[in-house]
Amino acid sequence: MTCTLGEVKQRADFIVYWGGNPAECHPRHFTKYTIMQKSKFLPRGRKDRTMVMVDIRETKSAKAANIFLQVKPGKDFELITILRALIKDQQVGDEQIAETGLTREALDDLVQRMKSCKFGCFFFGMGLSMTRGKHMNSAALLTLAAEMNAFTKFVAMPMRGHGNVTGADVIMRWQTGYPFGITFNRGYPRYNPGEFSTVDVLVRGDCDAAFIIGADPGATMPQPAINHLKRIPTICLDPHVTHTSKLARVHITTAAQGISAPGTAYRMDEIPMPLKPALKSPYPTDEEVVRRINEAIAQKPFWLPEGSQPQMISTQV
Amino acid sequence: MTVTLHLKQPPSVPLEAEVLSPNVMAELSNSEIRSLVVYHGKRQVPLEEFFDVEGERSDELILHGELTKVRMIGRAMSSGSITVHGSVGMHLGARMTGGSIEVHGDASDWIGAEMMNGFIHVHGNAGGQIGAAYRGALAGMKNGTIIVDGAAGLEVGMRMRRGTIILGGPAVDFTGLQMKGGTIILLSGAEIRTGAWMNRGTIISLKPLQMMPTFAYASDFNPTFVNVYTKRLKQFGINLPFTASQGAYQRYSGDLSVPGKGEILVWQPA
């Protein structure tokens, strides 16, 4: 259940930010898309919209909100599950609600507002998706948004980070059917996050080489993953010197996308945006480097014995 | 007569060896077993490159060695037995329909995932997603029994439909997530979010649990099915208390958010 930011700008009269700080991390989000804009359906702009902020602490974004709900750290999944029960008129005890740091009145008011709005939208950030529970916290909010469609139009959208992270997911999805955590070792894509996702592969030490484009796992991943990157031949493509490029065996400097190299970036609502370079760069683009590596690999012999094909797992049962 | 395999050296990257199954070995001669294809990363290699093989034509398999990077052992097996002396990798006994697996060591994630029937006993610790549904699938294990003597990881019994999982050690979060049926027995309890979003099924815990807020306390009682379970589980040295003189089970029902008819029974000694 998602939509474009254009739809949010035109129609969303109820906006919830969950576990993010858009005032400081996505500073143009409020003014360009969500709460400040006037539209045909919301002619009075900010006055026609309600904004709710759910977070564990009162950030700058909370000042922009009509309602601020301070949830206890690590209780997001519980709170969303309570909301899923409340929208179906199930009885949840006061004691259980109090454990999340909120009151029954606040939740009843929230549920009533959610049900009576015309177009609701959840935006969720790393405060939800990167805390204990991880993907299940996001799954909980997405399920809540899906279930709210029994009453009114509701969507959910992740607040994606810097760079073109959405683009990587989108391209993998239309090429393979899966957004990430894919292996091709049997000749066809297989998907299993936790088994094939980058951080887990590195932490377990399951790979014997790494090729990193436009990312800095050396700064963000846990120490065992970084140690493994140091052990194996790591190739890094990046315009800058990063933590990853320092530990990499090979660092190829490339032109910066959008500044000195053209390309397409995907906005957080998966809308492709063309990038026009303003400057010239002496360095090759990522695309050119990958194409030349591919050409070199094509010169090598096929990795399987002559005449054989990779076998699908199910055919061997 | 058995087929005995010794790992020569641990693989450097995961070795996908779904041929390590009694169904495959039962009709093959020693040389045919040696030339079975396994996947070392993306490369096809004969089994003998990683294993010393003794014996032939048997549905009793004995594996020795540090097999933590060897995946899919006993995948989709329907009969026979596998005994492992050492630790095993992911997907042990996934989608199996019969037979038994015994591991004298630790196991990894996804053991018995989507199994239809059969028996898995891990004497050490196990990973997460035991008897679970693969990502995108609606139902996990459909029947059979999994016993883990040690601790377990995340999402044990996720979306399981039937069957029994018994954990001797503690589990982490999301035990019985979205359960649709079956039984999970926790002898040492679990961390948080046990039974989250469960539709049906039973979770029995002998240690106090931190309940999800969407579970409602129903009653204290001593269900008769527990003594039937105990009779069956005694052969594995597992004793569930069931008499009223020992105590009672607190029954919590939920998950209200689904809304589901699952139950969590928490033992309260008298």
Image: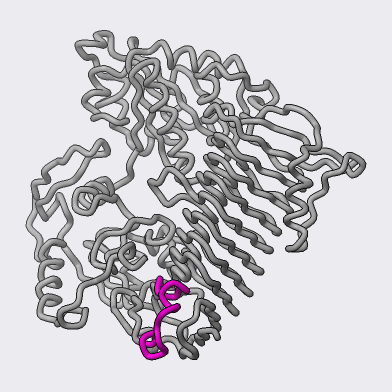
What range is drawn magenta here?
A: B17-34
Of B228 and B212, the residue lying toward us: B228
- Which residue lies at the image location 51% right of the left edge and 84% below the top edge? B3
Q: Is residue A161 above or below residue A41?
A: below
- The image's colouring method is one colour
- Which residue lies at the image location 30% right of the left edge and 47% below the top edge? A162
Does the magenta-highlighted stretch encompass residue B156? Answer: no
Please identify the quadrant where the N terminus of chain A is shown.
Answer: top left
Residue B191 at x, y percent in the picture: 66, 48
Left or right of residue B14, residue B43 in this image: left
**Residue A311 in which image quadrant:** bottom left
Q: Is residue A285 above or below residue B70?
A: above
- Which residue lies at the image location 31% right of the left edge and 71% below the top edge? A210
Left or right of residue A275, residue A219 in this image: right
**Residue B118 in which image quadrant:** bottom right
Q: Is residue A127 above or below residue B215?
A: below
